[in-house]
Amino acid sequence: QQPVQSPQAVILREGEDAVINCSSSKALYSVHWYRQKHGEAPVFLMILLKGGEQKGHEKISASFNEKKQQSSLYLTASQLSYSGTYFCGTFDNQGGKLIFGQGTELSVKP
Amino acid sequence: EAQVTQNPRYLITVTGKKLTVTCSQNMNHEYMSWYRQDPGLGLRQIYYSMNVEVTDKGDVPEGYKVSRKEKRNFPLILESPSPNQTSLYFCASSDRGTWGETQYFGPGTRLLVL
């Protein structure tokens, strides 16, 4: 089942903060975050693993609550370049089948 | 340069005319997969492959076929395309397809079925 992201869309001014949430009805082994600019391929941001390990972006942080099966992506002091659609993704069980949420569209205005 | 390539990038076809979208990666990755992207639905996985000759269904496999005869290539085949397969398609690869690996996406193929 597809993870659920919230909000579906958010508009920010440059310098403002945003939080994007991702929740799953299934147990999570890891959570992946990707950003997609309009008309382009998704680009890797971050992976959070069970047990607390994180890999990814310097300026974007995220949390992973395994018990609640939730992850949140924190965008602080947003820049114009942060605009795009953000996707969270989770692997089914041991790996292989990767399921993405429906996306959160973020617009950063000057 | 490490990359995933897809061809063609744009394709207009008619209902029922078989087509193949190619995907190739030069990173020696074992894992490859195909996604379709439709407005409001996000990225949905069509098929994935954990290695040569090993393929499995994703969430939306109906109407699609794949094959993995070589490690670097993973073509997507639409034997009888229909208008509901009009979409943006992405191929992706990663080292072994396990939880903690980055997915590298190709540039996408925009398909219109008339």
Image: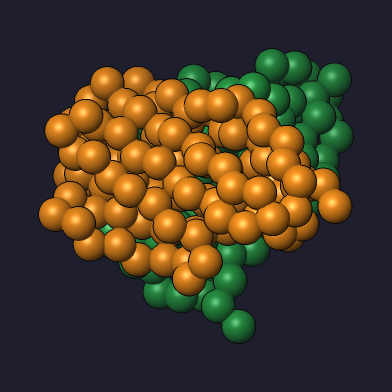
Chain colours: A orange, B green
**Quadrant of res B101:** bottom left
Q: In the figure, is residue B39 to the left or right of A89?
A: right
> What percent of the width, then of the height, locates residue B111?
76, 35
> What percent of the width, then of the height, locates residue A84?
69, 46
Residue that appears at 46% across and 75% down: B27
Q: Quadrant of the N terminus of chain B?
A: bottom right
Q: Does the rendering let one see residue B73?
A: no
Q: How many marks?
A: 0
Q: Is residue B54 above or below residue A59?
A: above
Question: Residue farthest to the bottom?
Answer: B1
Asked whether B107 or B101 is in front, the reply is: B101
> What percent of the width, then of the height, locates residue B10?
82, 45
Residue that appears at 57% across and 43% down: A18
Q: In the figure, is residue B30 to the left or right of B75?
A: left
Asked whether A1 or B31 is in front, the reply is: A1
Residue that appears at 60% across and 34% down: A104
Q: Quadrant of the C terminus of chain B?
A: top right
Q: Does the rendering let one see residue A51?
A: yes
Asked whether B20 or A64 is in front, the reply is: A64
Q: In the figure, is residue A25 to the left or right of B37?
A: left
Residue that appears at 24% across and 54% down: A49
Q: Is residue A43 above or below residue B17?
A: below
> What percent of the width, then of the height, locates residue A69?
24, 31
